[in-house]
Image (tube, rainbow, N blue to C red):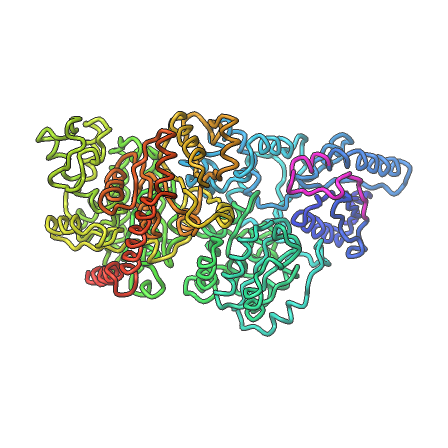
């Protein structure tokens, strides 16, 4: 390869000054030099590589005028400046090479290899008529995901509305809208970046640091769109061994520390060269590592915890705990660490280099992605290759995730899959012409078959139930299979010890209309048809296993399937128990002329539902024909084998007694599920955990927390009244304003300028909050809620008095419980003076203190119910015995 037709090849390789980009470029340069190419590394003077580590290469510094710049503070502007300033210098250098060639008998052909962040090199090559090859250090999937953003924006789907976050992006399977890059950035900055980085000149070829079998679908898509060669040459770090390419000094002493640990016992934690953590997050990581009782190697880059030079953020007691459990270093020789026999798991930001290095060593991963391609890579790891878990950064969740990975059966299965991947990587590296493809595995037959609704409250309840149901102890006896729609399909997989997914691609064609508009009988018929066939197929292949169908009330087609096939079915209801008789009585009330209720009846108690009034009944605000269409679907034609309620005997005893008398089927009350079992977040929206550190600075019981759930929409006038009421109350507040939740606005642009300034001084507005953590915080003294059942249970469980602003469905019934039965809530009238007054009543006045005492009394009863020997605990044990009786 040294010569071709008498001409040698000089490669001018132009890396970007980021660690994850510089590394593959230098690895490729080392390999190409071994093939007798002459190599010049034309690099900016920002983060220059150490030329002494690569004596075989020629280095050309390019003045960039970016010294001392913080990339994270302005990524787009940084690379605009770098490309503008480096362009002329590279152009002049190439002109010198070309002129020298013209005067020399030793002819060289010049080829420019650059990457997407040094796009100036492609422009220079084009201007001079030189071939240009693009090396991409990211996953191949990032390229089409990045390029599709302008079209999605034009179609109104980027930034995606909340309803799309869990849905698959058309043409990008298996990636969801929530996996797309740059979701957290302002859209104008994102579009500017896409425009800047989209190639403007014709490329001669693409090079990807990836493997065919890992990304076959994305690579096929790229080849179909771009009619130039695509070379997949990864993983480069396994093909060529280079000297260190790290910008930071590696602490090799950690290898001797690893030598003293047991095989596969250590979790290695490194979040890359750019990520920065808040102090509170870093402390949660530390506690999670300590509490896992597993040895750990934690890379904490100097300055990576905001406001600290290194590990001074660790409280003294915690620092002492950590010394006895693990090792903290400033930077590690990562490839050597991952190849070490004692490393059993890698907690990573899922940068592509880190992902490939872990896959290559067969090490399963804990995924904490931040931005760019990291979210796509995490989706690969958790849902495609199935060799990783997502990490929720809360000490209890971290502790559980580490134990799942290192000592649980699920982790062992994941380790086996990771080792299989490792073998495929070895084959790909040893035989470059051989293509490896992942084979689709069959569906595992299970005893619990659980279709769930696609909506947040339902997934919250089902997810918590499944996590408890699928605990390590129980999974040996009962296997679980989850049936989910493609819309939110990935969510439930994260909640079980052992679960499998069937994506009903065709089922969700009508979208979310069932819950919002209640006009989707054909959607449900399609679901019934597909699911019946799927279960029938599995039933035919069973020998000794029995099937029990679990479903919620919105996936009632599963009950019909069970009835048709003679299978037991159990209904898990995520609403309050009272919602069930309230819905079932509507046909009788309508027949007697009491529904829809006349104005004169609204304040009266429904005799059959004391203490609930006619105004508390669900669906009173809907047209009667739509209500009856819904009731026809939701009222079961055949009784289930049992009911499960996410409630507590103490809270709803009269209603539960009524249900038991009417239905001769067991009723299991196993709530509050979120207190019985801690699951990772089931939220469709990204939780802004920064609000916790904000709460840490507030006085006890002084803050009003405002969140109206995942579906409610407000008119602009209502939202402004809420804002004024919050400001005028003179109490600190955390207000969750979902993007798009105020009609006609993307987020908080509805706030007049003066009011917006007032709010900044009084409280905090976030797009979504980690609600359970917020309600458990000592600073929160009241919860202004839509009174959805999950929110109600979470407020009750933490002893937080509530301000009630119900909208529909069971929310009006739940609000009545809070205000008149449990007496731990006030109704909110959405007018600024009323809001101001009611906030003061709950946070400042004596009446609020009395309410707080009642809330704490109820909280104690909830704790008893969920503890060993309590009503919910015993009911859950009875449920297990009931399932095993089939």
Q: On the picture, is 762 further left or further right than 445?
A: right
- The residue at the far bottom in this view is 260
Q: Residue at x 47, y 48 (%)?
A: 699
Magenta segment includes 64: yes
Q: Is residue 579 left or right of residue 203?
A: left
Q: Is residue 302 left or right of residue 92?
A: left
Judge whether 439 appears above or below 250 on screen.
Answer: above
Q: Which quadrant would residue 107 be assigned to in this image?
A: top right
For the residue pair 772 and 544, the one nearer the viewer reads as 772
Give residue 418's position: percent from left, percent from top: 50, 59
Q: Nearer the viewer, residue 181 or 713?
A: 713
Check if residue 472 falls in the magenta segment: no
- Please give the range of residues in magenta: 59-81
In this view, the residue farthest toward the left is: 592
Above or below — where is 543 with respect to 549?
below
Farthest residue to the front: give it.
Answer: 846
Q: Which x, y percent locates residue 134?
A: 67, 40
Looking at the rendered structure, the number of numbered marks drawn on it comes to 0
| Residue 540 location (% of width, % of height) | 24, 54
Write the residue at 43% across / 39% down.
736
Q: Taking 190 as reference, is 346 above or below it? A: below
Confirm whether residue 529 shows in the render: no
Say if residue 418 shows up in the picture: yes
The quarter of the picture where the C terminus appears is: bottom left
Front-most of 742 and 206?
742
Query: Quarter-wise, where is residue 617 in the image?
Result: top left
User: Can you say whether 868 is above or below 146 in the image?
Assistant: below
Q: Nearer the viewer, residue 675 or 78?
A: 675
Indicate left or right for 502 with 379 as reference.
left
Residue 536: x %, y % from top left: 24, 49
């Amino acid at each position: 390869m040294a010569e071709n037709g008498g001409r040698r090849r000089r490669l001018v390789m132009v890396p970007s000054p980021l660690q994850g980009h510089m590394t593959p470029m230098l690895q490729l340069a080392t390999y190409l030099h071994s093939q007798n190419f002459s190599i010049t590394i034309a690099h900016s003077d920002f983060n220059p590589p150490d030329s002494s580590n690569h004596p075989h290469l020629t280095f050309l510094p390019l003045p960039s005028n970016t010294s001392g710049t913080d990339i994270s503070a302005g990524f787009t502007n940084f690379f605009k400046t770098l490309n503008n300033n480096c362009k002329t210098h590279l152009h002049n250098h190439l002109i010198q090479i070309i002129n020298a060639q013209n005067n020399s008998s030793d002819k060289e052909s010049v080829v420019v290899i650059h990457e997407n962040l040094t796009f100036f090199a492609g422009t220079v090559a084009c201007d001079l008529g030189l071939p240009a090859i693009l090396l991409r250090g990211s996953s191949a999937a990032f390229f089409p995901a990045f390029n599709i953003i302008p079209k999605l924006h034009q179609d109104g789907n980027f930034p995606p509305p909340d309803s799309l976050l869990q849905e698959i992006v058309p043409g990008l399977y298996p990636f969801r809208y929530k996996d797309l890059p740059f979701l957290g950035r302002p859209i104008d900055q994102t579009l500017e970046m896409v425009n800047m980085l989209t190639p403007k000149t014709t490329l001669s070829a693409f090079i990807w640091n990836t493997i065919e079998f890992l990304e076959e679908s994305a690579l096929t898509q790229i080849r179909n769109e771009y009619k130039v060669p695509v070379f997949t040459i990864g993983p480069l770090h396994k093909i060529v061994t280079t000297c260190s390419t790290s910008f930071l000094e590696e602490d090799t002493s950690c290898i001797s520390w690893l030598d003293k640990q047991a095989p596969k016992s250590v979790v290695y934690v490194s979040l890359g060269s750019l990520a920065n953590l808040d102090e509170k997050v870093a402390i949660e990581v530390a506690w999670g590592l300590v509490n896992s009782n597993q040895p750990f190697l934690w890379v904490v880059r100097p300055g990576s915890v905001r406001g600290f030079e290194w590990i001074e953020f660790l409280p003294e007691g915690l620092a002492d705990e950590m010394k006895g459990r693990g090792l903290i270093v400033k930077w590690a020789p990562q490839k050597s660490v991952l190849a070490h026999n004692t490393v059993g798991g890698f907690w990573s930001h899922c940068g592509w280099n880190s992902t490939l290095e872990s896959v290559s060593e067969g090490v399963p991963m804990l995924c904490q992605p931040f931005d760019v391609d990291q979210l796509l890579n995490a989706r690969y790891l958790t849902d495609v290759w199935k060799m990783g878990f997502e990490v929720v950064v809360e000490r209890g969740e971290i502790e559980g995730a580490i134990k799942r990975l290192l000592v649980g059966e699920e982790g062992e299965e994941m380790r086996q899959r990771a080792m299989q991947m490792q073998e495929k990587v070895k084959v790909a590296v040893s035989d470059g012409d051989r293509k490896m493809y992942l084979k689709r595995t069959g569906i595992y037959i299970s005893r619990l078959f659980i279709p769930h609704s696609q909506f947040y409250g339902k997934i919250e309840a089902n997810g918590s139930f499944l996590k408890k149901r699928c605990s390590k102890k129980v999974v040996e006896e009962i296997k679980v299979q989850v049936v989910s729609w493609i819309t939110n399909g990935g969510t439930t997989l994260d909640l079980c010890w052992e679960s499998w997914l069937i994506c009903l691609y065709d089922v969700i064609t009508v979208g979310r209309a069932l819950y919002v508009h209640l006009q989707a009988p054909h959607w449900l018929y399609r679901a019934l048809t597909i699911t019946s066939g799927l279960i029938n197929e599995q039933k035919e292949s069973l020998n000794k296993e029995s099937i029990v169908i679990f479903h919620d009330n919105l996936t009632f087609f599963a009950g019909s399937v069970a009835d048709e096939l003679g299978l037991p079915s159990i209904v898990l209801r995520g609403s309050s128990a009272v919602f069930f008789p309230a819905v079932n009585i509507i046909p009788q009330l309508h027949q007697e002329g009491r529904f829809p209720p006349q104005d004169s009846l609204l304040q009266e108690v429904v005799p059959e539902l004391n203490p609930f009034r006619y105004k508390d009944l669900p669906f009173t605000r809907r047209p009667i024909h739509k209500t009856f269409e819904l009731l026809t679907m939701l009222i079961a034609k055949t009784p289930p084998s049992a009911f499960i309620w996410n409630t507590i005997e103490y809270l709803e005893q009269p209603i539960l007694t009524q249900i038991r008398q009417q239905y001769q089927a067991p009723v299991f009350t196993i709530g509050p599920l979120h207190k019985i079992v801690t699951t990772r977040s089931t939220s469709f929206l990204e939780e802004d955990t920064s609000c916790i550190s904000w709460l840490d600075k507030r006085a006890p019981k002084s803050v009003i927390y405002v969140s109206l759930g995942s579906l409610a929409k407000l008119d602009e006038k209502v939202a402004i009244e809420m804002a004024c009421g919050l400001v005028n109350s003179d109490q600190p507040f955390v207000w969750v304003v979902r993007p798009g939740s105020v009609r006609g606005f993307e987020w908080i642009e509805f706030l007049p300028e003066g009011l917006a300034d007032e709010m900044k001084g009084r409280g905090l507005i976030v797009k979504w909050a980690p609600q359970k953590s917020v309600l458990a915080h000592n600073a929160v003294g009241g919860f202004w809620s839509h009174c959805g059942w999950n929110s109600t249970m979470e407020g009750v469980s933490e002893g937080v008095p509530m301000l009630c602003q119900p909208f529909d469905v069971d929310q009006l019934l739940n609000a009545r419980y809070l205000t008149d039965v449990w007496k731990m809530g006030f109704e909110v009238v959405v007018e600024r003076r009323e809001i101001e007054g009611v906030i003061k009543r709950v946070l400042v006045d004596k009446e609020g203190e009395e309410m707080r005492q009642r809330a704490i009394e109820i909280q104690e009863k909830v704790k008893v119910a969920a503890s060993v020997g309590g009503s919910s605990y015993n009911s859950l044990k009875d449920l297990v015995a009931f399932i095993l009786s089939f």
